[in-house]
Amino acid sequence: MNQEHERLPVWDPALRLFHWALVACVVGAVVSVKIGGSAMGWHEAFGLAVLGLIVWRLQWGFVGPQTARFSAFVRGPREILTYLRGQWHGLGHNPLGALSVLALLGLFGLQAVLGLFTYDEIAFRGPLAPLVDSDWQLRLTGWHRALEPLLWLIVLLHVGAIFFYAVVKKEDLVRPMITGYRRPPSGVQDVPPVEWGNKAYALRLALTIVVALAVVYGASGAWIPAPTPVAPVPGMDW
Ligand code: HEM
C-alpha cells in the first residue's frame, strides 16, 4: 500500500475549523452564562457565533466537499440497519452517526435562535427580543432554559460514541477531525481526490462565509432602531 492509500482525505480544513470553533463557542457560551452578570454580553456573542457556524455548516452540507454533504451521509433506516449488521463500508459519517450530526446541528441551532429572543427579567435581553411581546420573550426564554439538559445529553452521547470507537472498535476518529486524513476503513477501495485547496473550494467557502456573516448581522439586532428615550416630565426630577 503506498503512502497515498494510507492517508485518505476525509474532512476538509473548513469543516475541521468549524467543528473545533463550535466546541470552543459552546464552551464559551456555557461558561459565560454560568458567570452571569456582565459576562452575559459574552454569552450573547458566543451564541451569535454558534448561530453563524451552524448557518455556515448547513450551506456546506449542500456545496461542500463530498464527505461534508448531507446527501453523502444522511440515510434511512435500511442503511442504518445495514451499518448495525456491520455491512456498511464508507469514509465519512456512518448512517447512525449521521443522526447525531443532525441532532447536534439542529439542537444547537435551535438553542442559538431561541437565545435571540430571551429576557431574563433582570437586565439581559436577547438582540431580537424587541421583535416579540413580553409573553413570547418569557415563553422562548423558558424553552431556551429547558433545552439545556438535552444539549448536555447529546454532547455526552457524541463524546461517548467517539470514546467507544477508540476503546472498543480501536478506531481513532479524533485524529482525522484534526488532520483531515484517516486510515482506509475495511471495504473502502477507492481513494477519493482531495477536494480542497483549489479555486472552486475557496470561492464556495468565501460565499458561504458571507451568507453566514449576513445572518449573524441580522440576528445581532444591530439594524433595530434604539427605543426613543422618554422625555423628562417637567418638575419631576426624581
Ligand atoms: C460542545 C461539544 C461538541 C459539539 C457541539 C460537537 C459537534 C459536532 C458536529 C456537529 C459534528 C459533525 C461534523 C460535521 O460533519 O459537521 C461532530 C463530529 C465529530 N466530533 Fe464533535 N462536537 C463536540 C465535541 C467533541 C469533542 C470533545 C470531540 C473529541 C473528543 C469531538 C470529536 C468529533 C469527531 C471525531 C467527529 C467526527 C465523527 C465521525 O467521524 O463521524 N467532538 N461534532
Image: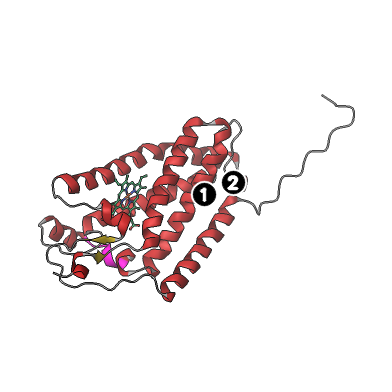
Q: Residue at x 50, y 30 (%)?
A: 35
The residues colored magenta run: 71-76
Number of numbered labels in the structure image? 2
Disc 2, disc 1: CB below 8 Å? yes
**Mark 1 lies on residue:** 48
Task: Kindly report the distance in space between the C-alpha atoms of the residues bearing marks 2 and 1.
Answer: 10 Å
**Where does residue 133 sit, x and y in percent of width and height?**
60, 43
Q: Earlier in the sequence, mark 2 or mark 1?
A: 1
**In the image, what residue occupies the spot 12% across and 63% down?**
186
Decide if residue 133 is on the left or right side of residue 187: right
SS at mark 2 in the image: loop
Which colour style is shown? secondary structure
In this rendering, would 234 be left or right of 128? right
Above or below: residue 218 compared with residue 200: above
Q: Is residue 89 left or right of residue 120?
A: left
Judge whether residue 143 can be spotted in this image.
Answer: no
- Which residue is painted at 14% across and 50% down in the image? 170
Residue 66 rendering spot, x and y as whole percentages? 31, 69
Q: Is residue 19 above or below residue 167?
A: below
